[in-house]
Amino acid sequence: MNTQSFTYNQPLADVNHIVLVGRAGKDPEIRYFDSGKVVTTFSLAVNRPTKDAHTDWFDIEIWGKQAEIAGEYVKKGSLIGVDGKLRWDSWISKDTGETNIKPMVIADSIRLLGSKKDNNPNTASSQTNSFDT
């Protein structure tokens, strides 16, 4: 009987990848910097497909041309697909001195998944727009 043993020393690749589909919880906030960079942030509500209908909320951050597109087309309630990575932000509260930690999704690309009517009240045909960096 021929048996091979494999030794697991390190992972082949580290992966930090997140894919979310949900609805924008508010209109995006766009910030322009003196350096010319632009960032857009918005919240995303993702419903779990369970009986209790729990909703998970994610803060989304997107940079560059993607940020400008998100700022123009994403509106509260828009159905959005987000592809990106997870970052953990931490800070010390000035009031309590406690360390706070929250996840932030850094989007690499977004997709507008709703119809044009959902994203622009003046149009009625359906669409799927993809904006990849």
Image: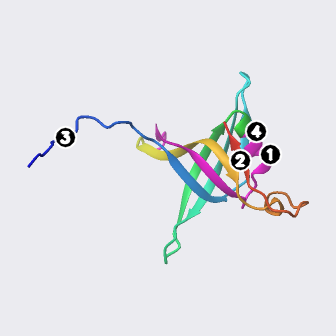
Which residue sits at x=27%, y=35%?
A: 10
How far apart in space, not on screen, are marks 3 and 1 (Cα)?
52 Å
Q: Which residue bears the numbered disc 2?
A: 130
Q: Are marks 4 and 1 in contact (CB under 8 Å)?
A: yes
- For numbered disc 3, what is the local secondary structure? loop
Closest to the observer, 29 or 50:
50
- For numbered disc 4, what is the local secondary structure? helix
Q: Quadrant of residue 31?
A: top right
Closest to the observer, 88 or 85:
85
Q: Which residue bears the numbered disc 4?
A: 68
Magenta-drawn stretch contains 81? yes
Q: Residue furthest left?
A: 1
Which range of residues does the magenta coloring cover? 67-95
How far apart in space, not on screen, are marks 2 and 3 (Cα)?
42 Å
Question: Would you call the spot at circle 3 few (<14 residues within 10 Å), some (14-19), or many (20 or more)?
Answer: few
Q: Residue furthest bottom?
A: 51
Marker disc for residue 72: 1
Q: Which residue bears the numbered disc 3?
A: 6
Closest to the observer, 41 or 13:
13
How far apart in space, not on screen, are marks 4 and 2 (Cα)?
14 Å
